[in-house]
Amino acid sequence: MSDTAPVRRLRPASMTDVAALAGVSQKTVSRVVNGEPHVTDAVRTRVEAAIAELGFRPNAAARSLKSQRSRRVGLVTIGTDLYGPTAMLTGVEQACRSNGYALSIVRTVTASAAELQPAVDSLVEQGVEAIVLSEPVENQMDQLRMPRGATILTLGPPDVADRENTLAVGLDESGAAFAATDHLLALGHETVWHIAGPANWTSSVRREQGWRAALQDAGVAEHAPVEGDWSPQSGHDAMRALLTRPDVTAVFVANDQMAVGAMHAIQQAGLSVPQDVSIVGFDDMPIAAFLPTPLTTIRQDFAESTRLAMHRLFRTLDGHPPAERHRMLPGQLITRATSAPPSPTRRHLRPTD
C-alpha cells in the first residue's frame, strides 16, 4: 500500500470532521447546512466542498444547533407484545424518523408510579423535548412528577389532556364498544355478554362502559363481565366459564386476541361460531380477516391515529399547538362471519365437558 492511499473511514462523517477539513467552526458548518445568511461565498463554497468530499449527511443533531433544541422525544411504555401497544410503538418510531427526531424508549415491567417515575426521570436527564405515554402508563399521570415545560402526549383516552402542556389522541372506545354490542342486539340476541380486559387499563373501562350503555339503551339484561388479561388463554378460560350458561348466544370481547381464545373454547366444547355463539372482537388485528371463521371486530387504525398524534406533537414543538388539545377518533365496525342471528336450535355445552 502506498503512503498516499486513502484512509478508510470507520464511522460516518460528522460536523466536526467537516469543520476541520474546511478550516471553520462547527457553528459555521451549521449555518451552511441550514441555509442561514452571514456566510461569505468563499466560506460557503469551502464548507460545501468538504461536505461533498466527506459524504457528510446533515442529521437532526446538526439541525438542532440552529434552534438550541434537542429534537429528541421520549417514550414510556410497558414491555408487552400486545398488538395495540406494539403497533403504536412502531408508529411513533416511524414518525420520529421521518421528521428528524431522535427517540428514546424506556420500557417498564408494570404501570406502577413507583416504576414509572424513574423512567420519566431518565428521559428528562436525556433532554427530551416531549414525552409520549402509551396506555396503561398514562393512567398514572396524576401520580408522576412531569418535567416543567415539556410537552406530554398520551396515546390513550382524551380526557387526560386536561393537564397543562398535555396532548391526547385516542379512540372513542366507549362509542366503538356501543356499536359492537348494538350490532349483536340488532341481530336479535336477547342480550350480550362481555369478556373484559384488565381492570387497571382505561381501555378496558371504556369498552365496558360502551357495552353497558348499549344494553341499557336497549333495555335488556346486564350480567357481570368476565375479566381477562388481553391474552388468548384468558379469553379461552373466560369463554369456558360463560358456556356453562344456556343463555349465552352473543359475546363482545374486549380485544381480538381474547376473541381468538374464546372461539377456540367454543369449538373445543363441540359448538360452533356463529351458529351457537356469536363473537365480536376489538382491534382488527391483521390476522382477524384470515381466521378459519373471519372475525367481526372493531377496527382501530393504529397507523393513522399514531401519525395524527405525532403530527400534532411536532406542530406543538414547533410553536403551533392545536386549538383543542385532545382528539377523539371513531372506530369502525367490520362485519365478518363470527356474528349472526341467534339460532333457534342453539346447542349447549356437552355434559361430558
Image: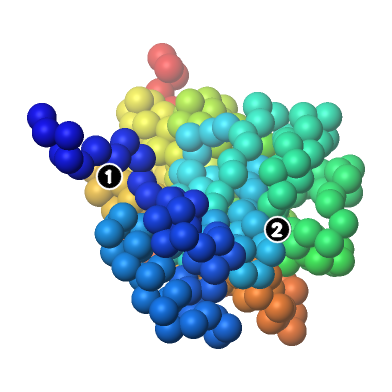
The residue under label 2 is which amino acid type? Glu
Res 154 → quadrant: bottom right
* Residue name at image x 46 percent, y 53 percent: 20
The residue under label 1 is which amino acid type? Leu
In the displayed image of the protein, which residue is found farthest to the top?
Answer: 352
Between the C-alphas of marks 1 and 2, the distance is 43 Å
Return the residue at label 1.
291
Q: Is residue 349 visible?
A: yes
- Relative to 182, say whether 8 is above or below: above
Q: Residues within 10 Å of mark 1 (few under 14, many from 20)?
A: few
- Is label 2 in a helix, a strand or a loop? loop
From the viewer's side, name the closer residue of 55 and 118. 55
**Where does the image place residue 285, in percent across and percent down from the top left?**
39, 50
**Where does the image place residue 141, in percent across and percent down from the top left?**
82, 48
From the viewer's side, name the closer residue of 272 and 349. 272
Asked if the residue under mark 2 is in contact with the one under mark 1, i.e. CB atoms within 8 Å, the reply is no
In the displayed image of the protein, which residue is found farthest to the left?
Answer: 1
* Residue name at image x 86 percent, y 43 percent: 144
* Residue name at image x 54 percent, y 45 percent: 85
Return the residue at label 2.
129
- Quadrant showing the N terminus: top left
From the viewer's side, name the closer residue of 237 and 287. 287
- Is label 1 in a helix, a strand or a loop? loop
- Quadrant showing the C terminus: top left
- Circle nearer the N terminus (1, 2): 2
In the displayed image of the protein, which residue is found farthest to the front?
Answer: 3
